[in-house]
């Protein structure tokens, strides 16, 4: 049975928000060599990985070079927390994505460096970065 049971996403005007639910408590699952990665197809060669480091959850932004090597880069404002569920907050600025930019990504669960599960399975999530006027355009009473 899959370990990931639910994937939800949303956004604020300046950040992408992801929620991942598991069959087990997220904080217990993401220990040792387990990690969750949000891999971007657009922009290409970027990913955010979350894993336990020193007893705390750490979120890291990585970029891939022409040789396929992943390198960690500074990521101010990148946040993740795992207790019952995993929550990830990724500033659009870290992705170089401004209003109207179309993002495409997958969320995957890894153990010992091997991918166990990927969601969605066949095509990336597509998210359009909102403009500052997004709330005004979508407001109803």
Image: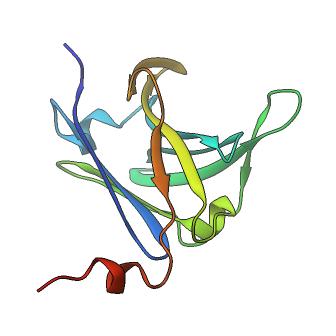
Residue occupying image coordinates x 55% and y 21%: 113
The image quadrant of residue 68 is top right
Residue extending furthest toward the left:
141
Q: Residue at x 67, y 48 (%)?
A: 43
Q: Position of residue 17 (x, y in %)?
A: 37, 60
Asked if residue 23 lies left or right of residue 79, the reply is: left
Q: Which residue is found at the position 48% from the left and 19% from the top?
A: 115
Where residue 42 appears, x then y in whole percent? 64, 44
Which residue corresponds to the image point at 54% horizontal and 72% vertical from the top-left? 77
Q: Nearer the viewer, residue 71 or 17?
A: 17
In the image shown, does 16 or 58 lie closer to the viewer? Answer: 16
| In front of the other: 84 or 137 | 137
The percent coordinates of residue 103 (x first, y second) are: 56, 50
How many discs appear? 0
- Residue, far top: 1
**What colour-coding does the image apply?**
rainbow
**Residue 89, horizontal then vertical, whole percent:** 42, 62
Q: Determine whether 40 is above or below 76 in the image.
A: above
């Amino acid at each position: 049975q899959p370990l990931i049971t639910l994937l939800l996403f949303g956004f604020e005007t300046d950040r992408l928000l992801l929620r991942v639910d598991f069959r087990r408590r997220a904080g217990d699952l993401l220990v040792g060599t387990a990690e969750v990665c949000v891999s971007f197809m657009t922009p290409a060669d970027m990913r955010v990985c979350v894993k336990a480091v020193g007893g705390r959850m750490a979120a890291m932004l990585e970029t891939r070079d022409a040789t396929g090597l992943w390198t960690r880069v500074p990521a101010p404002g990148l946040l993740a927390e795992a207790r019952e569920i995993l929550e990830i907050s990724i500033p659009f600025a870290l992705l170089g994505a401004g209003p109207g930019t179309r993002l495409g990504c997958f969320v995957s669960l890894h153990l010992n460096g091997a991918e166990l599960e990927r969601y969605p399975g066949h095509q990336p999530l597509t998210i359009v970065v909102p403009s500052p006027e997004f709330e005004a355009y979508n407001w109803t009473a």
